[in-house]
Each structure stands twice: as C-alpha cells, then as structure tokens.
C-alpha cells in the first residue's frame, strides 16, 4: 500500500464529512404514501411494492409512513408489520447514506469473507451490534449472496459491486466508491454505448454484475475517454456475458474484415494504447500525439508499439480449449455476441422465431408434447418434468391461469439466473411467453431477487421493449394471443424460492410455505392453476422449439436430458459460468474446465446444490452430473451452484455455515425446521469451538433424520444434507474436532499463529496486524500475543519469509 493511499485512508472520516452532499428534503409521508397507493394500488398484493417504494425514498420504513399505509389501504397493521419484519430487505431504523452489503455466500465464505467483514468494520470503527459508522456515511449489512461468486469475496455499495476483496484492499474499495460519487460517475447508464455503430469497428466489453465487480466499469470509462482524446469514431459497446469470469476485465476489438481480438484482465491504463494499436486516430493533433507517444514507448520500454499484446487471448491456447471443449451452450447461446438489450440483434439470431412458430403453426397441446419429448426437467432444483407440469396446468379447471418465472435465486454460490437475466433477457421472456401459450395463461409474473439490481433493470427494460414491439401484451405478433407480464422484486427471503412461499409473496403476504397438495398446478396464484419454472428452464425452451425436441434429447443421459448451466466458483483456477451437457463428470468440470485448484493446495471436495445439497469428496469426482447419480451420492443438482473446496477448507465449518444459513432463513412455521436446525447448529458450533462431545456425532445423525422427515417444505427437508454428507465422507474431521483439532486450520478456537526462527525482523507482520497483536521489534524475532490475535491471517500472508505458521490442537501440533 503506498504512503499516499495510507494517508488518504487515515483521514477517511474527515474527507467523507467534507464531501458529504446536502441531504435532500424528504416528502411528507402522508402525501408520499397517498401518491404511491394511487399508482400501485390498495390491495394486499400491492403491500410489498409499496414498502419497497417507501424504503427507496426514505432508505428505511418510517413509522409515520407505515401508519399511513394502513390508513390508505385498509391492510391491517399485523399484515404490514408481518411483511416488514419477515423480509430481510426492509429496515425499520435510519441508515447511512450508503449501504455496504457484504456477501457471505459459500464462495465468499471459503475465501475469507468473515475476516474481510471484520476489516471493513474496523476501518469504519463500527463496534458491537452497531451497523453504521459515526458520521453516517456507511451502513454495513450482511447478505447471503450477491451472485458474483467467481470474484469472491465480494461486497456491493448501493448496487455497485467490488470483487476480489481482502483485508488489504477493502478500505480502498470504499475510497474508490466515494471518488466515483464525487465525479458523478455512479449513475452512468451501463447499457448506453459510447456512440453509434461505426464503420471503423467496435470495442466490446461485458457489463454484467461480475464484470463490473472485476473493474469493467473503469475500463469502459478509460476506453471511452481514449476514443474522445484520439478522435477515434469507434463505438464502445456492452455485450452479453461470455462466461469467462476468470479473465475479466475482458475487452474485444472488432475491426471490419479482421478477426476479433480479445484482451483479458485488461488494465484501464492501456486504453489509449489499445486505440492506437487498432484504430487510426483522426486529426493532425491526434496523429502527432500518437507518433510522440509511440516514440516514448519505444524509448522507455522494450514492448514497443504494442504494450497491450501481453493481454491477448488466443482461443487456440490449451487452457481456453480445455475450458470451452466440454461445453455446449443452449441457455447461453450466442454468449458474448450482442448487447443484451438490442432487440434487433436478438431477432437476427433467431429470437422469437420459436414463439412465432407456436402461435402460428402449433396448438398448446402440441407445444407441450414437444417439450415432454425433449425430456426437459426443471432447472430450479427438484428436476420435475417441465412438459408434465405444463400439461397439468392446461388440463386443470378454472380460469384465469397464470405463469410465474421464479428468479428468486437465493442459493449462496449460484448466479446462473442472474447472468441469464442480465445477458439474455429476451430469451427468458420468449420462454415465458411460450409457456403461457402452452398452458392457456394470459397473465404472468417475473419475480426477481432485489439483490440483483442490474438484472431487475435489464429485465424491466426488455419487458418494455417487447411490449412496445408487439412480442408481449395484446395481440402478440399479430395473433389473438395476449400475455400481460409484470415484474416484481423479491424482498429478501430465501424460502421464497419454494413455489408456495413465492406465491404468498406475490400476493403480498409473508413468504411462508403451505402444505401440498394441492399443488400450484391445481391451486396456485389467487387459488388458480399456475405454472412455475425458474429462469434457466424458460431460457432453454426457445432453443427446443427452434431445433426440435430430438436435438435436445440427444444431449445428456437417459434420465437427464440437455444441458445444465453451473456457477463454478470457490478454490478453482478458472471460476466461471459454464454450460455443459448432462452426464459430464465432476472431474471434467473441476479439472478440465476449471483448471483444478490453485498451486499449493489439493482438490478436496465440491459442494453442489447450495444449502440443500451436499459436499462430495474428490474420490467421487467421476460422478456424472445427473439428477439420479447426484442424489445417490447424497447431493442434489439444485439450481446449479458448484463450489470447489481444497484441503484448506474445514468440512465441519462448511456444515456449520450452511446450518447457520438455513436456520436463519427458516420461516419458523415447522417445529422440526425451526427448532431442529437450531439444535444442529448448536452442536456444530460446539465442535468448531473445541467443546465437542463424543455423543455429538450420533446426535447430529439422529436430529438430521428427524428434521428431514418432519419439515413441511424443501428448505427444512434438505437442510441436514451438508451435515449428512460431511459425516458420510469426512467423519474423521468431525472426530478430530472432538479431540480439539481442526485439520484444515480454519476454526479459530482450535488454531494459533506462531512465528518461527525464520523471522528476519522486517516488521511487516507488525505493520499489517489490525489488532496490534505483534509488537514491532526491528531486526529481531517477532512474537504474537495470542490473546489479542484475531486469526485474520494478514500476518502470514504478508510474511516474505514464510516464517509464520498455523498450529492446531491443544498441544500445538501442526
């Protein structure tokens, strides 16, 4: 860290106070709520959108506004407070000017989000149960997952995401955000191009959430400025996600008549060099500047005229070939080729051809038969046959009928739906429209996680464009078909991923699951037949209708057809978004596509299926990605999160992490889930604290069985899975914790840091220790005060001589 940056961070509080803008005068709650209900409505179904609008305006839910909601709508105070306290998005007390959402998803957890969170709070001087810094600039909140798992650890500040955080750079991220605020760059429209299409060519870069977290916004700003400075009439455009998350910031240069050139991990400082390399600047001044700069390049560097060539990506390189080789893109078809909101580009690539075929050549029953013949199963977790679900809704009595797109992707470690909505929103909407036609529905709801603000914006704009061009709404594509589709934002409840809880949320109630049967196909939204599928399922449907059921069924295995999108993250070299045919093995995904774990560690396990899934050991890496095969091994397909774990991951800690998540997210309706997960968590916390008992393992197994059998919905029924697979495959680690040892060196109560005789007295460990646990002794061997040590690992990572080691166990054994 430079001295200048260190000085800026130390004076951070006074700087923030100096640059704080005058607060805007907020409207009177009575007038504001009155205008709201006149726009949104007064029914129960309007409650959550009303509360969200109030919070957007006031940044929390003022008591006066809630009272006014009751007066204007007639909704009971019990229902209003029930929703306000059930959904984690809502806040009942004032907050700072900016909300810092620290991700604690699976990938972030295994990569140290806990110690990064601690460093963030130390920097802001937030102690105890407080969540806001003293000058009211930042409020820190914990979120389950931000969907940028390949860049873990991650945090989001008012919708702007920062990735690859550490205890060393989290404070710099705050300063970067404040600098963007001062420049007025926070509200830039990421979907705006830098200019019209140019005959000279284009510079393209993806602007989805992961890429923004990886620095693409700064790259776009630099490229746009370089084009202006050099008077180069070239368009700087946003494109859909390519899936190459491990290579971002990723820049493509397309010149007429030439092959596209791709630059990986692009540094903004090379923006002008890229423009000079590929495009001829116009104007005498620009040409003279180019010549002078080129001369300086040759004098100062042996890289000559092409300082960016070291970033060039050759698609023939073995790592890239290994990454792309096993993949087959259907849901991600045409990835990285066009702007996500360019409707004409989508039409040019076959967009809405499948919907037109359905509307003009096929009846609803024929569409359903085609989907049934393809073998498509729901990609949301349970894997129920999609065509069969649609058939049940079509045959059910009662009207109207509804379709729902479940975009409430809450599994920590999964971001497939977020990416599809951000990069291919038209494809998802086309799939929803085909489903509506097949089941006979004229109304639908697209329900998206509020934690995905970029996906919400793009989906909402895509919906507007489709209605404007006649692909949705009245008389779609000139036919008699009508589909009124609306977008609703979730309010922060993992349990709303369960279909009956999701329906309750849409109806304006607490997202509490209900007993089935009846299933939503018989009695769903407003008690009417309802078809619910997730984002990826809908994204696959247009391809099936364009290419035929047989083409889709030819991929995959006998019981699991087609492809599956996975978010590959965790301890893996090439974290990315991938789409592979069913039947590909876990080993192919982790080692061939993902490149294996980083050097210095070994592949230990893979966590599949989120909190409902399980951890499979490396010895089962040849298990195929297949619904049945994964279930037999003790895991589930889930929505598609796949988090790789190495030998530095504690399996007891991972089970504790997932039980903490499911216990916190339990709606509380079932005693077995509400109390059972709490008891399981208590046992796991005791083990991680070194206070385990010999009877604990039997207690875990017995309790897990009871919770699985007695819970009402999938959250409780699958909550024990991480514990059961841990006991099945990693029992020795549980036994070690009973003995007071953490073999992976993770559980803080069971480890201590020690400085060896290799210490050279450089004092770097002392300088980096945030707890002042290492007294500075220049040129002498240092010693760690164990009572003050927070086990943040900053000293060990910063030691140039590897003189700091982790000891585990009561006797300090390595």
Image (cartoon, helix red, strand yellow):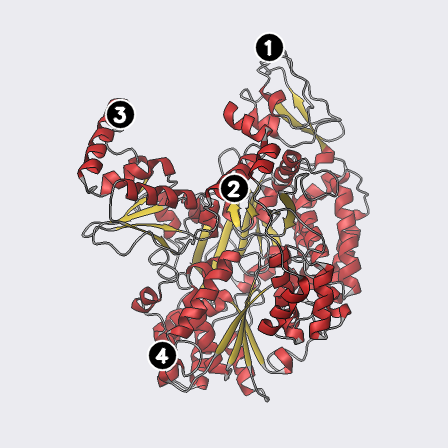
Query: Label 4 crowding class (10 Å Cα cut-off): few <14, some 14-19, many 20+?
Result: some
* Residue that mark 4 sits on: 356
* Residue that mark 1 sits on: 779
Q: Nearer the viewer, mark 3 or mark 2?
A: 2
Tag 4, which secondary structure?
A: helix
**Could you say which quadrant of the image residue 645 lies in?**
top right
Residue 759 in the image: x percent, y percent? 60, 16
Q: Are marks 1 and 3 in contact (CB under 8 Å)?
A: no
Tag 1, which secondary structure?
A: loop
Query: Label 3 crowding class (10 Å Cα cut-off): few <14, some 14-19, many 20+?
Result: few
* Residue that mark 3 sits on: 302
Q: Residue at x 66, y 76 (%)?
A: 43
Tag 2, which secondary structure?
A: helix
Circle nearer the N terminus (4, 2): 2
**Could you say which quadrant of the image residue 734 lies in?**
top right
* Residue that mark 2 sits on: 177
Mark 3 to mark 2: distance in Å?
35 Å
Mark 2 to mark 1: distance in Å?
39 Å
């Amino acid at each position: 860290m430079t001295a200048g940056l260190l000085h800026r961070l130390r004076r951070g509080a006074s700087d923030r106070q100096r640059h704080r803008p005058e607060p805007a005068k907020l409207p009177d709650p009575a007038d504001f709520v009155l205008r709201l209900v006149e726009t949104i409505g007064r029914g129960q179904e309007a409650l959550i959108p009303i509360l969200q609008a109030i919070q957007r305006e006031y940044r929390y839910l003022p008591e006066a506004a809630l009272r006014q909601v009751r007066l204007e709508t007639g909704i009971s105070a019990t229902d209003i407070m029930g929703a306000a306290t059930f959904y984690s998005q809502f806040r009942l007390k004032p907050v700072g000017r900016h909300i810092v959402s620290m991700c604690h998803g699976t990938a972030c957890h295994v990569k140290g989000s806990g110690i990064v969170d601690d460093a963030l709070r130390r920097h802001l001087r937030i102690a105890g149960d407080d969540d806001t810094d003293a000058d009211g600039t930042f409020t820190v909140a914990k979120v389950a997952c931000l969907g940028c798992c390949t860049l873990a650890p991650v945090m989001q500040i008012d919708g702007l995401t920062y990735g690859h955080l550490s205890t060393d750079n989290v404070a710099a991220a705050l300063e970067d955000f404040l600098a963007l605020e001062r420049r007025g760059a926070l509200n830039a429209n990421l979907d705006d191009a830098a200019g019209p299409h140019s005959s000279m060519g284009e510079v393209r870069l993806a602007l989805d959430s992961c890429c923004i977290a990886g620095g693409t916004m700064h790259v776009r700003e630099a490229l746009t400025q370089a084009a202006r400075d050099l008077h180069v009439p070239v368009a700087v455009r946003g494109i859909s996600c390519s899936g190459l998350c491990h290579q971002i910031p990723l820049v493509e240069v397309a010149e007429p008549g030439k092959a596209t050139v791709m630059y990986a991990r692009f540094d903004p400082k090379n923006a002008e060099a890229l423009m000079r390399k590929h495009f001829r600047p116009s104007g005498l001044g620009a040409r003279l500047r180019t010549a002078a700069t080129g001369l300086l390049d040759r004098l100062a560097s042996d890289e000559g005229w092409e300082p960016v060539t070291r970033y060039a990506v050759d698609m023939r390189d073995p790592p890239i070939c290994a990454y792309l080789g096993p993949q087959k893109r259907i849901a991600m078809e045409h990835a990285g080729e066009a702007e996500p909101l360019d409707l004409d580009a989508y039409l040019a690539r076959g967009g809405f051809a499948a919907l037109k075929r359905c509307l003009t050549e096929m009846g609803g029953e024929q569409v359903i038969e085609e989907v049934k013949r393809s073998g498509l199963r729901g990609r949301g977790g349970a894997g129920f046959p999609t065509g069969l679900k649609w058939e049940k809704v079509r045959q059910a009595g009662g009207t109207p009928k509804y379709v729902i797109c479940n975009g409430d992707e809450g599994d920590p470690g999964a971001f497939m739906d977020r990416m599809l909505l951000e990069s291919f929103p038209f494809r998802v909407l086309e799939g929803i429209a085909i489903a509506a036609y097949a089941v006979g529905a004229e109304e639908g709801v697209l329900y998206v996680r509020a934690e995905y603000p970029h996906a919400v914006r793009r989906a909402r704009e895509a919906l507007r464009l489709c209605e404007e061009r006649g692909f949705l709404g009245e008389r779609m594509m000139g036919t008699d078909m009508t589909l009124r589709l609306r977008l609703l934002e979730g309010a922060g409840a993992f349990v709303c991923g369960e279909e009956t809880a999701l329906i309750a949320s849409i109806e304006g109630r607490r997202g509490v699951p209900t007993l089935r049967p009846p299933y939503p196909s018989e009695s769903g939204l407003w008690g009417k037949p309802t078809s619910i599928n997730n984002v990826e399922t809908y994204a696959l449907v247009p391809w099936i209708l364009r290419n035929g059921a047989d083409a889709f069924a030819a991929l995959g295995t006998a019981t699991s057809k087609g492809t599956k999108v996975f978010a590959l993250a965790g301890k893996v070299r090439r974290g990315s978004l991938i789409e592979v045919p069913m039947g590909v093995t876990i080993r192919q995904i982790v080692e061939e596509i993902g490149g294996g774990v980083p050097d210095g560690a070994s592949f230990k396990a893979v966590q599949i299926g989120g909190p409902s899934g399980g951890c499979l050991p490396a010895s089962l890496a040849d298990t195929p990605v297949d619904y049945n095969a994964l279930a037999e091994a003790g895991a589930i397909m889930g929505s598609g999160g796949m988090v790789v774990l190495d030998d530095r991951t504690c399996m007891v800690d991972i089970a504790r992490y997932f039980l903490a998540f499911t216990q916190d997210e339990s709606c509380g309706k079932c005693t077995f889930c509400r109390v059972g997960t709490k008891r399981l968590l208590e046992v796991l916390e005791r083990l991680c604290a070194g206070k385990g008992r010999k009877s604990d393992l039997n207690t875990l197994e017995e309790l897990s069985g009871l919770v699985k059998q007695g819970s009402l919905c999938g959250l409780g029924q699958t909550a024990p899975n991480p514990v059961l697979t841990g006991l099945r495959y990693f029992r020795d680690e549980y036994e070690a914790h009973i003995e007071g040892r953490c073999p992976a060196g993770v559980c803080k109560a069971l480890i201590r840091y020690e400085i060896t005789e290799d210490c050279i007295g450089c004092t770097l460990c002392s300088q980096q220790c945030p707890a002042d646990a290492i007294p500075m002794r220049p040129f002498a061997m240092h010693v760690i005060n164990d009572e003050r040590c927070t086990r943040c690992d900053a000293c060990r990572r910063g030691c140039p001589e590897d003189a700091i080691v982790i000891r585990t166990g009561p006797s300090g054994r390595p």
